[in-house]
Amino acid sequence: MNAANELAITRKATQLEALFANAAILLHERGDDDEEVFAYMRRYSPELDENLRVMLNFMKDPHNRTYTFCYSYGKRLLEELFAACGERRLWHKRVISGPFTPERVRMWSNNPRKRSSQNR
């Protein structure tokens, strides 16, 4: 696969993450019914209807309803960290080697002096 195709796929995947987050907001915050949320997903997603139904049921499960946001917002936080700090491999190793909170990632991204002392 060439770099241009890979970039296009990555951008589409990111858009789909936002689509499912929006669908969860429609479902849980606005209180839209299942068919309205399904119609929203159907309009913007290339996924098969059966996959969208599975995703909708997943979003409705009380144990999974926040899961949609964990990946999309976690990814966004880490991309901001990598962009702000450079040394992507070093920071990737850091975040997979132990527990951290979103607030800690924001601190690392926003405060260069604390980043170096906290990166252990």
Image (cartoon, rainbow, N blue to C red):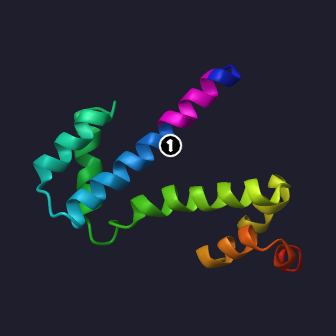
Which residue is disc 1 drawn over?
14
Vertical position of residue 56 compared to residue 93: above or below: above
Q: Name the residue: 82% across, 74% down.
A: 115
Identify the image quadrant of the N terminus: top right
Q: How many marks?
A: 1
Q: Quadrant of residue 33?
A: bottom left
Is 8 a magenta residue? yes
Q: Amino acid at mark 1?
A: Thr
Secondary structure state at the residue bearing disc 1: helix
| Image position, residue 30 (x, y; %) | 19, 63
Depth order, front residue of 53/120: 120
Residue stretch rendered in magenta on the structure = 5-12
Q: Is residue 52 above or below residue 61?
A: above
The structure residue drawn at horizontal position 62% and vertical position 78%, both measured from the top left corner, is: 103
Q: Furthest residue to the top?
A: 2
Q: Main secondary structure of the magenta part?
A: helix
Q: Is residue 93 above or below residue 34?
A: below
Residue 59, horizontal then vertical, whole percent: 29, 59
Name above or below for residue 37 compared with residue 1: below
Q: Quadrant of residue 64?
A: bottom left
Q: Residue 105 appears at what percent x and percent y? A: 67, 71
Membership of 72 in magenta stretch: no
